[in-house]
Image: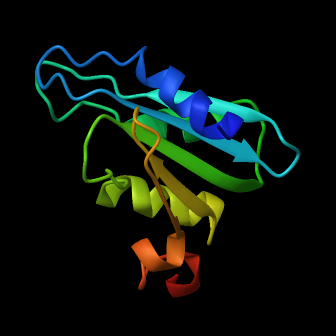
Amino acid sequence: MDPLLQAALDARGNAHAPYSDFQVGAALECDDGRVYTGCNIENATYGLTVCAERVALLKALSEGARKFRRIAVAADTDRLTPPCGACRQLLWEFCGDAEVILVNPRGRTESFRMKELFPRPFDDSFL
């Protein structure tokens, strides 16, 4: 298995999802090969919950990473789970048309470009 996909699956094990029991992991690969992982972290108010993709992205940015190649998102669903709208916005802004690979624990995968998942993004070109 691709190490990036395995990293996302492993990160899923760290999810804090006591309310929904919906555990998600993400692994973000920089252009230099470094990988940053994240998992979803729920809060009792739900509105302050942070998705795995955003955790991985914010960890990478906070460590100085700025160029990204691809991200893997792992969830235990038969219909593979893509990033939510908020994650798509941030991924577009910081990763551009990166590859997004969805995976589940049974090894099923799908791959997209961000442009496919977020065809008309709002970005700094509108400012």
Taking the spot 23% from the left edge, 30% from the top edge, the residue there is 48
Q: Position of residue 63 (x, y in %)?
A: 74, 30
Q: Position of residue 61 (x, y in %)?
A: 67, 39
Q: Which quarter of the figure is the N terminus placed in?
A: top right
Q: Position of residue 78 (x, y in %)?
A: 25, 47
Determine whether, in the image, residue 96 is placed left or right of residue 123: right
33 to 118, vertically: above or below: above
Determine whether, in the image, residue 37 is placed left or right of residue 81: right
Determine whether, in the image, residue 51 is placed left or right of residue 78: right
Taking the spot 78% from the left edge, 37% from the top edge, the residue there is 64
Taking the spot 71% from the left edge, 44% from the top edge, the residue there is 29
Q: Nearer the viewer, residue 116 or 43?
A: 116
31 to 114, vertically: above or below: above
Taking the spot 50% from the left edge, 86% from the top edge, the residue there is 126
Q: Position of residue 97 (x, y in %)?
A: 62, 72
**Colour scheme used in the picture?**
rainbow
> Which quadrant holds residue 6?
top right
52 to 19, vertically: above or below: below
7 to 16, vertically: above or below: below
**Hey, which residue is sitting farthest right in the picture?**
32
> Which quadrant holds residue 59?
top right
Q: How many marks?
A: 0
